[in-house]
């Protein structure tokens, strides 16, 4: 079976590119899994983890904070508003950001809460896999 060629970029930088067996992303309609030979897709991405199984069988997690992805042939392009590799996330900082967002006196910042929860989830899943 052919491999997928995956490229992940955010507004700040190119995060990762390489070969993969599968990619799972979170869209407004739910999660979508992509394998080689998938039909073309263009979809929005919402807050959530992007899960990649590399060709060597290792797993990779990326915190995605909005954007979109496209599938054409065996190429996947992820264009994220903000994206962070799991190993780059400071779990304690993410927990502190969640506490600050939840403690907002006037009105909780829902976007900041979702962003912090995604970062905590991705960092926690990555730590559990090690």
Image (cartoon, helix red, strand yellow):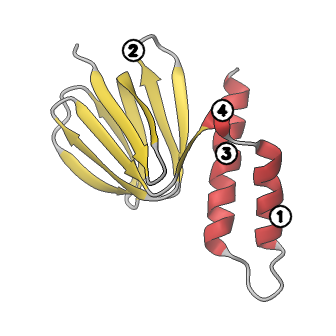
Q: Position of residue 37 (x, y in %)?
A: 18, 28
Which residue is identified by label 3? 121
**Residue 129 against residue 100 in the figure, above or below:** above
Of helix, strand and loop, which one carries label 2?
Answer: loop
Of helix, strand and loop, which one carries label 4?
Answer: helix
Residue occupying the point 55% across, 34% down: 61
Which residue is identified by label 2? 55
**Residue 21 against residue 104 in the figure, above or below:** above
- For the C terminus, which image quadrant? top right
Residue occupying the point 66% across, 31% down: 126
Q: CA distance from mark 3 to mark 2?
A: 24 Å
Q: CA distance from mark 1 to mark 4?
A: 21 Å
Q: Position of residue 9 (x, y in %)?
A: 41, 44
Q: Nearer the viewer, mark 3 or mark 4?
A: 4
Q: Who is closer to the viewer here, 10 or 21?
A: 10
Residue occupying the point 35% across, 35% down: 7
Give neighbour class at mark 4: few <14, some 14-19, many 20+ (Cα, 10 Å): some
Which residue is identified by label 4? 87
Q: Position of residue 35 (x, y in %)?
A: 29, 28
Q: Earlier in the sequence, mark 3 or mark 1?
A: 1
């Amino acid at each position: 079976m052919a491999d997928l060629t995956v490229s992940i970029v955010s507004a700040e930088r190119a995060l990762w590119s390489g070969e993969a067996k599968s990619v799972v992303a979170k869209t407004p309609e739910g999660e979508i899994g992509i394998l080689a030979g998938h039909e073309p897709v263009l979809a929005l991405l919402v807050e959530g983890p992007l899960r990649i199984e590399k060709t060597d069988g290792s797993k990779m997690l990326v915190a995605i904070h909005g954007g979109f992805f496209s599938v054409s042939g065996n190429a996947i392009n992820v264009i994220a508003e903000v994206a962070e590799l799991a190993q780059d996330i400071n779990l304690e900082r993410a927990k502190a950001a969640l506490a600050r967002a939840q403690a907002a006196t006037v009105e909780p910042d829902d976007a900041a809460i979702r962003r912090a929860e995604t970062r905590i989830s991705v960092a926690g899943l990555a730590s559990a896999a090690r």
